[in-house]
Image (cartoon, helix red, strand yellow):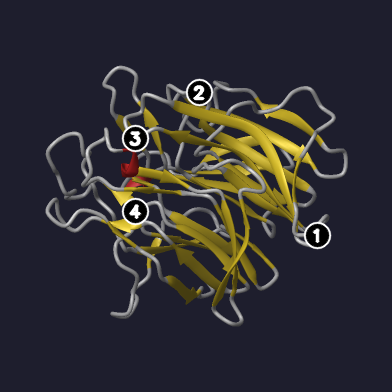
């Protein structure tokens, strides 16, 4: 979900029904629709269907304000029983002026390759891409790439596996903070090849654009003063404030019989002051009218308002997933 002026754009995604057996093809459905949400009128409009990228989910997205376009990179689709998995490496653009999709054809031969559940963020004429899964075995990465809008070319800034980078991961928060000239990374998960399970993270990292280096701003024991390990959350940065909502935490999850993995959606809202040295996240006390506990929801900001849509809660094994079809918004407070 990405914002352009007063509009929010939402492409693709998937619907998974854990109550159906994995052999049922209806247990997972991927989409290729592009919708626009007009925040001034609270109205959804279907813009395209079947005219751009193929059905997929966990693609990377960013808005290019120079050429007024939505950029979509990669993504993944899989069959209900995971017998077929495809991670994409195509690069698409949707023109806000013409309303048409087309492929982006960079002049550089080097590119990030297959990628899904990674992070992409725009800042000052450059689209940054970090991490994500790179193959059908869900292998995580921690390389950093930059796509220069003016030269139409990719450049690898930090290769995969270089010491000093955040640990390899996917399904994390990755945001640009223009006022600090930095990128911020929080949380996520990574498949552990030794256990076959996903390890989750609760660290926060800053990337200095001018110096091309990462800094872990939450080295132990600082990690006990902010949210528990978290993935599949949503966030945005407004001026000097990061707002973080929901996601999946490993605190008292709902445990169901296999093949359903433990589910732990949360509805906590956290704030981080990106201007000052790290002092911990602040839990925001909201009123009773708050979104339900959600994971896999999408979020972005228009001005000082943070919007979120989609995702699902999981109150119990008997109830299963409850998908969120509401749009929620909150004004982001200023931190000083």
Mark 4 crowdedness (10 Å alpha carbons): few <14, some 14-19, many ≥20: some
| Residue, disc 2 | 135
Residue sitting at x 44%, y 44%: 218
Which x, y percent locates residue 77?
A: 47, 35
| Label located before the other in sequence (4 or 3) | 3
- C-alpha distance separating marks 2 and 3: 18 Å
Q: Secondary structure at mark 4?
A: loop
Q: Name the N-terminal-most of marks 1 and 4.
A: 1
Mark 2 lies on a secondary structure that is loop
Q: How would you rate the neighbour count of disc 2 (Cα within 10 Å): few for under 14, some for 14-19, many for 20 or more? A: some
The answer to which of marks 2 and 3 sits earlier in the sequence is 3
Marks 2 and 3 in Cβ contact (< 8 Å): no
Residue 328 horizontal/vertical position (percent): 44, 72
Which label sits on residue 195? Answer: none
Q: Earlier in the sequence, mark 2 or mark 1?
A: 1
Q: Quadrant of the N terminus?
A: bottom right
Distance from disc 2 to disc 1, alpha carbons, whole Å, reads 33 Å
Q: Nearer the viewer, mark 4 or mark 3?
A: 3
Answer above or below: position of 218 versus 156. Answer: below
- Rate crowding at label 1 as few (under 14), some (14 to 19) or many (20 or more) other CA atoms within 10 Å: few
- Who is closer to the viewer here, 170 or 224? 170
Say which residue label 3 marks: 80
Residue 98: mark? 1
How far, Cα to Cα, is label 1 from label 4?
42 Å
Distance from disc 4 to disc 3, alpha carbons, whole Å, reads 32 Å
Residue 32 appears in the figure: yes
109 lies above or below 243: above
**Of marks 1 and 4, the one in the foreground:** 1
Secondary structure of residue under mark 1 = loop
């Amino acid at each position: 979900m990405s914002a352009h002026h007063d509009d929010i754009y939402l492409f693709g995604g998937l619907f998974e029904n854990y109550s159906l057996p994995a052999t049922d093809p209806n247990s997972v459905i991927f989409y290729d629709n592009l919708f626009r949400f007009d925040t001034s009128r609270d109205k959804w409009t279907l813009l395209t269907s079947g005219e751009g990228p193929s059905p997929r989910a966990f693609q990377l997205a960013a808005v290019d304000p120079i050429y007024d376009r939505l950029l979509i990179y990669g993504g993944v689709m899989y069959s209900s029983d995971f017998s077929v998995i495809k991670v994409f490496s195509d690069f698409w653009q949707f023109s806000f002026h013409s309303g048409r999709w087309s492929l982006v054809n960079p002049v550089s031969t080097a590119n990030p390759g297959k990628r899904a559940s990674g992070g992409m963020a725009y800042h000052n004429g450059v689209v940054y891409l970090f991490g994500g899964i790179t193959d059908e075995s869900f292998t995580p990465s921690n390389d950093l790439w930059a796509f220069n809008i003016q030269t139409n070319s990719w450049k690898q800034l930090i290769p995969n596996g270089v010491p000093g980078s955040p640990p390899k991961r996917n399904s994390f928060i990755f945001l640009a903070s223009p006022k600090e000239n930095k990128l911020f990374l929080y949380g996520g998960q990574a498949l552990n090849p030794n256990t076959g399970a996903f390890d989750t993270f609760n660290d926060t990292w800053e990337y200095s654009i001018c110096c091309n280096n990462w800094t872990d701003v939450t080295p132990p024991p600082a990690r006990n003063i902010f949210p528990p390990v978290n993935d599949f959350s949503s966030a945005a940065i407004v001026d000097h404030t990061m707002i973080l909502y929901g996601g999946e935490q490993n605190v008292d999850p709902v445990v169901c019989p296999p093949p359903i993995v433990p589910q732990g959606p949360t509805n906590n809202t956290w704030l981080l002051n990106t201007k000052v040295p790290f002092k911990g996240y602040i839990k925001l006390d909201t009123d009773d009218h708050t979104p339900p506990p959600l994971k896999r929801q999408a979020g972005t900001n228009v001005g000082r308002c943070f919007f979120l849509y989609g995702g699902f809660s999981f109150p119990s094994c008997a109830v299963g997933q409850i998908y969120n079809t509401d749009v929620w918004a909150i004004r982001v407070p200023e931190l000083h």
